[in-house]
Every structure is written in C-alpha cells, then in structure tokens.
Image: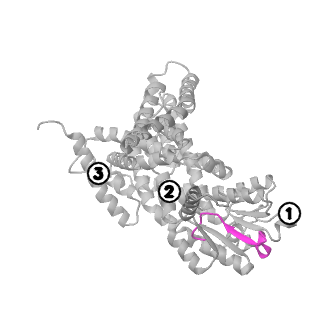
Amino acid sequence: MPHDISLITTVAAAFGFALILGFVAERLKTPALVGYLVAGILIGPATPGFVADLSTASQLSEIGVMLLMFGVGLHFSIDDLLSVKRIALPGAVVQMSLATLLGMAIGQWWGWAIGPSLIFGLSLSCASTVVLLKALEARGLLSTMNGRIAVGWLVVEDLATVLILVLLPPLAGVLGGNAAAEGSGPLWQAIGKTLLEVAAFIALMLIVGRRALPWLLWQVTRTGSRELFTLAVITAAISIAYGAAQLFSVSFALGAFFAGTVMRNSEFSHRAAEESLPLRDAFSVLFFVAVGMLFDPAILVEQPWQVVAVVAIIIIGKSLAALALVLALRYPLNTALTVAASLAQIGEFSFILAGLGQSLGLFSSEGMSLVLAGALISIALNPLVFAAVEPLRRWTLRHSAQAQRLEDRDEPYAQLPLSTDRKYLEGQVVLVGYGRVGQRIASSMKAQGIPYVVVEQNREQVENLRREGIAAVAGNAAEPAVLIQAHIAHAAMLVIAAPDAINIRQMADCARTLNPAVEIVLRTHSDDDSELLRQDGIGTVFFGEEELAIGMSRHILQRFAPPATE
C-alpha cells in the first residue's frame, strides 16, 4: 500500500516517546512536561537516530496551541482575577517588565540586536500556568489565598502576553524583522489597524459569539449524542481560531482564547471543559514535543555560561523581583515566598512568543535553544524550589528579626474597628470563608437578622465587606490570633464554609480551646472526611452530595405524599 505515512509516523513516535519519558519524569517527581520536551529532542533533527517530520509536527503543534489557549479561556475567571487584582495586576506588570529588561540587558551584552533581545526578555518573563497549577494541586495550595494570588498573577501575565502576541507583528519591521518590507505606511497606522481588527473580532465574539455558541451547544445537546457535543466544542475552538486568523489577522492563540472565554459564560462551560480535556491534553503533548524538536542539545556544551545566565534570570532574578514586590505590597513573607516559587519557571507562552519571533525573523535558533534550555531546567527544578519554601521560611524567621517583622507585620484589616456594634462581639456567628457557599449563608443570616462576623483570607474581600457595613476580619482562621479578633470567645457558633479541608481540624481545635461551648458547623467535599469528622464529634458536618440527595428526596416525597385526611 504505497502512500506517504509521515503524519502517522510523526504522531506515533511523538506519543510513544512522550508516554515513556513522561512516565519517567513523573516517577522522578518532575512534571511530565519535561518528559514531553525531552521526547521532542530525541526525535528531532539535532539528535541521532529517528527524525520525525518537523513540518508535520509544527502544524500539529499549532492545533495544540489552539486547544491549549481554548482551555485557558474556559478556565479564565474575571471574578477570580478581580479578587486579587491589587496584588496580581501591579505585581505581574512590574515583574514582567523587570524580567524583560534583565533579559534584554543580557542579550545586548552578548551582542544581540534590540529585536532579538526584546523577544528573549519577553520569553523569560512569563511563567507556565500549566506547571503552576500542577505544582499547587500537588501541595494542596490551589484553594488557599496564596494559591489564588499566584494563579491571578499568572492570569495577568497570560493576558499581557496575549496583548504582546497581537502587537508584535506590526512592530516587527521597526525591530528589524521580516515585516520591514511589508510596511506600506507609518507604524502608528499598522498598530492602529491591528488593534481595530482585534477590537472588531472581540466585539463580534461578545455580541454574536455569546449568543451563537450557547445556542449551537444547546441544539447539539438536544440530540443526546456525547460525541457530537465533543465535536461541536472542538470545532468551535479550532474554527474560531482559524477564522480569526484569516478574517481579522488575529493569531490562532488569541482566537482560541476568546472562544474559550465566550464559552465559559454559557451553562455548558463545565461540560465543554470535561469533554474537550482528553483531546486538549493529547494535542498539548504534541505541542511540547514539537517545541522539543527545535532544541539543539549542543548548546549546553557550546554555550554553558549562557544557559546558566538564562536559568539564573528565571529562577533567581524573577523570584527575587516577585519576592520584593509582594513584600512591598505589605503581604506576609509566606505569601511572598509562594509567589516567588510559582514564577521560577517558564513554559508554553515562552515557546509561543519565541516561535512567533522566529517566524517574524526576529529570533534565531540559538535564542530558541537557550529559551528551551531555560524551560527544561527551570521546570525540572521547580518542585525543588517549592519544597524549599517552608524550610527557607523557618530558617529565615529563626535567624532574621527583619523577617519576623515581615511575617508578623500589621494587617490593616486584622482587627474589627473599635466602632463595631456590640451585637457582633457577643452571641454572634463567626463565618469562615466568603465564597459561593459563605455568601449564601451570610445572605440567609442577614435576612433573619442574625449577627455574624466574616473571617476571610482575601484582604480585598474584607475591605469590600467593610464598605458594605459587614463586620469582617482578614486572616487564616486556623491561627488563634485571627479567631480572637473575630471574638470567638463569646460567639455562639463557628461556621466553616471555606473549602479548606487541610485546616478544618485546626480551626475547630482553636475555637474549642478559646470557647469550649461554641457550636461548630462545617462543610466537607469528601464522604470519607465527613465520616471521620462525625466520628471525632467535632461538630455538625454537611457533605455536599449528601445534602443534595436529602433535598431532592424531600422534594420527591412531598410531591408523592398522600393528601391529608380530615
């Protein structure tokens, strides 16, 4: 059967090597992404043995970029970003600027032109959201305040990088790239045209897409076919990305990102994320493998000091900048160290930026190899950086009085105002957590006139609550000092509505120590946890799925109850 099977060969080799090396990476407690990149190196042209079709792998990686950005858009939440905007927005912008300037300075020192130096600095400035999420999940930090700050920080970085991807093509001519010969007018006209095209695309997505996509998914859902729903989601992601590129000169990445953000606003967003996840994961693997194929391992031998400099910028330079910025914004040392560790790596957006730079003639294969080397090494070392956070914090606190002051610095919202009404200080409910569950509980208590004090780790949330006249304290309820400020000693009830399974027992123990008579009500996400907590007699335990079943059963029984007889 004589025919060209380069596509099948490339896919088979990419998936096969990625599976083996991804498994090895996970066994070594390293992100599987490292294994995928190494798999690309092994089947790339820079290493001996089998060489996959680079052109085919490049096109497959473009699909990976589309689906990767579509997934980012599906999980992008304006509310989550706004909850930490006062630290994430200025912190991310300043940190990216400093890292870019540092990378540019190194590039200029090596004799590079301004264009390649800029691409190099930008590529080193943006951390990987994929790597961060996996690191936070592995350590149970994703739902904590520190985790939300780190994720919000990277969301701002992602949005800034998307803007850079939009503006880079019209600026390529000025920076010495391929677009220099294409420019038919002043630079401001090229930038203005690009921004108008992007604005037109965004407006079309917000006006038409917000209505058309949910309607389309609803029509497909009515067929009852799961595979058709998955096909509709993937078709929307890729078709919108392709259409955006062809009609509005918008990058595939930006088109797919907005397809995801628009779909997030529909009632099918969770199902769309679940159904498209396997295909997104598969093509994301192909993206990282294709990036690995561009890497030349010889650079580790030929330019070792340049590689060391790149890794130093990523792990030391970016981390120190983030550490100083978080401390300057008056956050505790623990938060600063967590954010610093989160940024000590680079990933998918760095590859996309460097690849765009190459396509525009602004970046060399040498620069791409340096970025890839920095990514491989920083991702491999990131688990060690995270593991060093707590020991470093303890050591610093033991040996530095200044560090102790930074850790225990005064929190402006850590105490209730002196003008707080007495009804919030005695016989009140202390409500821990003001998320979706906490807000509903608070609304019910407010309607019944029950006084309550909110304990919330998000400082901005506490500030907003106080503006609304609600008694609130900022801090972690697992710390006795925070519960004391919420006047737990004289409270009638402690309600733990925060999804923090790790610290529930510590919160309950602190409350019992300070007020043995306090009644405790708490929530769990696990059947096993709820059973253990009930056996320990900590308090009244509510398990989400159990309460849902009880509520639905009650409704059914009421519906079919026999009519009352006189």
Cα separation between marks 2 and 1: 39 Å
**Position of residue 102 in the picture relative to residue 513 (left or right):** left
Label of residue 28 in the image: none
Residue 534 rendering spot, x and y as whole percentages? 58, 76
Residue at horizontal 64%, vertical 75%? 539
Mark 2 touches mark 1? (CB < 8 Å): no
Q: Would residue 109 be visible to someone looking at this image? A: no
Query: Three-letter amino acid code at disc 2?
Result: Leu
The image's colouring method is one colour
**Position of residue 363 in the picture relative to residue 508 (left or right):** left
Q: Which residue is mark 2?
A: 133
Task: Tell me which label, 2 or 1, sits earlier in the chain.
Answer: 2
Specify few, some or many for label 2: CA neighbours under 10 Å numbering under 14, 14-19, or 20 or more. Answer: some
Query: Three-letter amino acid code at disc 3?
Result: Phe
Q: Would residue 384 be visible to someone looking at this image? A: yes
Q: Is residue 488 magenta?
A: yes
Task: Tell me which label, 3 or 2, sits earlier in the chain.
Answer: 3
Q: Which residue is mark 1?
A: 420
Determine the residue located farthest toward the front in the rendered image. Answer: 566
Cα separation between marks 3 and 2: 23 Å
Q: Which residue is mark 3?
A: 15
Specify the segment rendered in magenta: 484-503
Mark 1 touches mark 3? (CB < 8 Å): no
